[in-house]
């Protein structure tokens, strides 16, 4: 499977609810995530699963979000890694899961997601 997402995400500039990014690391593995909204770092090596407010539709309309996640294989039962990226409070919900099997126990997989917000 792929280790990258490129997605346009439609926001409502009149909606006061902030867009939420949720990151979930699968298979009991260890993950660290960083993200930039345009050039501003908004998440810095956050460990594990989390959700983060990105901004209201009017604030992020026309901007891009670049998310990188490193997943380390810490489970001896499997070398499979995965990460799910979810966006909510836009026009619709987006959910995408990326998967990769590392070749050796303790290996690392890198994932990237690029979202362009538009109205």
Image (cartoon, rainbow, N blue to C red):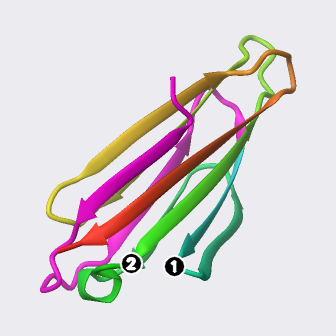
119 on left or right of 86: left
Mark 1 is surrounded, within 10 Å at the Cα level, by few (under 14), some (14 to 19) or many (20 or more) other residues, namely some
Mark 2 is surrounded, within 10 Å at the Cα level, by few (under 14), some (14 to 19) or many (20 or more) other residues, namely few
Res. 63 mark: 2
Residue occupying image coordinates x 25% and y 80%: 57
Residue 32 magenta-highlighted: no
Give the farthest residue toward the top. 77
- Can residue 30 be seen? yes
- Relative to 7, is 111 above or below? above
Label 2 to label 1: alpha-carbon separation: 6 Å
Res. 38 mark: 1
Coordinates of residue 47 in the picture (x, y in percent): 71, 55
SS class of the residue under badge 2? loop
In the depicted view, which residue is nearer to us: 27 or 119? 119
Magenta residues span: 1-30
Coordinates of residue 69 in the picture (x, y in percent): 65, 49
21 on left or right of 75: left
* Quarter containing the C terminus: bottom left
Residue occupying image coordinates x 38% and y 78%: 63
Quadrant of res 11: bottom left
Coordinates of residue 117 in the picture (x, y in percent): 31, 70
In the depicted view, which residue is nearer to us: 7 or 90? 7
Res. 71 mark: none
Residue 7 magenta-highlighted: yes
- Can residue 84 be seen? no
Q: Earlier in the sequence, mark 2 or mark 1?
A: 1
In the rendered structure, are the residues bearing label 2 and label 1 in contact, judged by CB atoms less than 8 Å apart?
Answer: yes
Coordinates of residue 17 in the picture (x, y in percent): 24, 79
Residue occupying image coordinates x 59% and y 66%: 35
- Relative to 119, is 86 above or below? above
């Amino acid at each position: 499977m792929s280790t990258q997402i490129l997605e346009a995400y439609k926001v409502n500039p009149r909606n006061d609810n902030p867009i939420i990014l949720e990151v979930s690391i699968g298979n009991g593995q260890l993950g660290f995530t960083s993200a930039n909204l345009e050039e501003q770092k908004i998440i810095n090596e956050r460990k594990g699963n989390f959700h983060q407010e990105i901004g209201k539709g009017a604030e992020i309309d026309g901007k891009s979000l670049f998310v990188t996640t490193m997943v380390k294989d810490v489970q001896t039962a499997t070398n499979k890694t995965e990460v799910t990226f979810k966006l909510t409070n836009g026009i619709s919900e987006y959910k995408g899961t990326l998967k990769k099997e590392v070749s050796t126990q303790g290996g690392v997989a890198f994932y990237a997601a690029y979202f362009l917000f538009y109205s």
